[in-house]
Image (cartoon, rainbow, N blue to C red):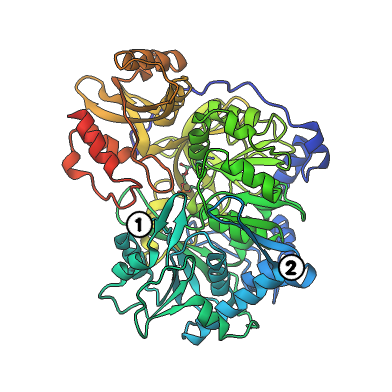
Amino acid sequence: MVWWPPAFPLMPETSKMIPTKKDFSAKARIRDMDEYKALYQRSVETPEAFWKEQAQSLTWMHPPDAVCDTSVPGEHNWFSGGRLNVAVNCVDRHAAATPDKTAIIWAKNEPGEYENITFAELKRNVGRVANVLRSLGVRKGDRVCIYMPMIPEAAYAMLACARIGAIHSVVFAGFSAEALRDRIVDAEAKVLFTANEGLRGGKKIELKRIVDDALDGMTMVESVLVARRTDADVPMKGGRDQWLDEAMAQQRAACPAEWMASEDPLFILYTSGSTGKPKGLVHSTAGYLLYTSLTHRYIFDAREDDVHFCAADVGWITGHSYIVYGPLCNGVTTVLFESTPLYPDASRYWKTADDIGATLFYTSPTALRALMREGDEPVKQGKRESIRVLGTVGEPINPEVWRWYHDVVGEERCPIVDTWWQTETGGILISPLPGATPLKPGSATLPFFGIKPLLVDANGNRIEGNDVSGLLCIEGSWPSQARTIWGDHQRFLNTYFTAFPGLYFTGDGCRRDEDGYYWITGRVDDVINVSGHRIGTAEIESALVSHDAVAEAAVVPKPHDIKGQGIHAFVVLTESSDLGADEVSGTLKQQVRHAIGAIATPEEVIAVDALPKTRSGKIMRRVLRKIIAGEAHQLGDLSTLADPTVVDQLLEKLK
Ligand code: WT7
């Protein structure tokens, strides 16, 4: 990372603040910046007292006798001596207090189809699944793989593992057999949950067939539990496979909850690094649950009567923290959304929000960009009156899209929370508080309670003051910080704690503006060095996307004889674009030059039909980088590519 120079301040609009909404703030948990600052100060100056107090929101079987030990970076632990169970916190205590309240609204693939599950029903279903696992010999600490579509059984399976102390590893149901197999083997899972088929948008996904391929010749997985999502019959392997509904019907609903230690692992979740095979990040029981529920409460201003509609998939950390654990721990109704933002059309999110009375809505910039491209009309097909807070996560959001979200979707009524975090952080670390923080489109704004972000240069020197850029690190620990990489603690230490001794290194570049607001510029492995100047690809892409003709953009470097690296841009044009083929490059170069400066001008701007993306919607710049550099023969691992034909189309185009 020695190549990180002082990035120059390129972000537009940094000084324009959008004030908080009076009506919202008046009723908010944190009503203004003074309240935020006071609580933030307390959280970082007296963290033990702060976290001890917060921990009282959890139901403990035995209270912890210490708050935290964070003296050795990478060896942090929280709430030692405590005993608790996550399922008791997320299910039982609400089933006792509000048994008939809806815990989960399942929004099925087809529009207008919903199923509500109350807390009492959730408790019974989780208990049955937990007893199924026990009957299969699953014990505390065993690993269980969950490869399921967005159906209630996915949440039952996660919570059932938590109930008996098994460690779940949810693998996104869009991964291939090979990717699934690698993850099963790495975690040594002995039981696997799946469904006969998954339904997503216009597609059927043959999950059981993929599972059969993944398990072919493998003896590690002893039992496969198959949820019945469709009426498709699938081959069942004798002695290994059984239908989940039939297995559940044989079990009692009551299942005693295991007394877990605070630091016992709750789950493993795989994520890609810049090198090597996917790493299984391990999250803890107490710290994870406390931090996700606390952030959910404050960042979404969550209340008892809220309906939390997070459109993510449980296969990602967002689904773990802000569909299942955070909202349910708070007793808030959560939504499992089985479909896609564009099925059957671009009004889907908004009509769903109306149907179920969603009050909190959380999605990704990628989805918003895709929707914005379809224009305002589909948005207007939904009233959106129930929505109070709009959230975004996953990548930097370009100010234009942010504005559209704010002005068109939220009709300038709803605060936007641009939440920065990572699989490794477990919960949101940098985000506005919706009633307190004046907003800036494109900035994740300020740290949450207890979080100490700091910027360093390539040599690890701290960069003080405002209006500066650097590498984003976090000082100290927070309760939901990942504890290790499954089976490879050394890799955990090497990846996150050695680049800058004493600090957690996020891998992100970041700017702190003149008001102390944080702007995440993207992964530092995605920055481009032009004549010794580093430019965040996110910044150039934001400039391109701000042109009316551009729906999506991806920028990658290519070796350049004189400049070191040159900037190469790929764009997907909007349907309404009237740019002629011969105008694209010139016009859009000018656009970048205009928005950022001559230094950021791309060498070329290539219009393509689609960009290579992961199934979670992240653009795979690595693939573009290789293609543009003429290294198409060594594209590396393409298993996370959503649509492999995109690569062929690109190669054809660039011939
Ligand atoms: C990386 C983490 C956290 C859930 C989904 C992604 C980028 C995440 C933001 C944001 C700018 C963001 C960062 C981070 N990122 N949120 N609000 N603004 N960038 O989880 O797959 O672990 O990816 O996503 O680069 O490091 P993930």
Q: Which of marks 2 and 1 is nearer the N terminus?
A: 2
The numbered dot on residue 363 is none
Residue 430 visible in image? no
Up/down of 304 relative to 515, above or below: below
Residue 377 visible in image? yes
Say how many tags the image has.
Answer: 2
The numbered dot on residue 278 is 1
Up/down of 201 relative to 279, above or below: above
Q: In this view, does 315 lie to the left or right of 332?
A: left
Q: Which amino acid does label 1 sit on?
A: Pro
On the image, the x and y values in percent for residue 461 come to 46, 37
Q: Which residue appears at 56% of the width and 79% of the height?
A: 130
On the image, the x and y values in percent for residue 511 come to 51, 31
Quadrant where the image shows the C terminus: top left
Q: Which amino acid does label 2 sit on?
A: His
The foreground one among 344 and 365 is 344
Q: Which residue appears at 58% of the width and 46% of the height?
A: 429
Task: Label 2, secondary structure: give it.
Answer: helix
Asked if the residue at label 2 sits under 8 Å from ligand 1, the reply is no
Q: Which residue appears at 63% of the width and 50% of the height?
A: 309
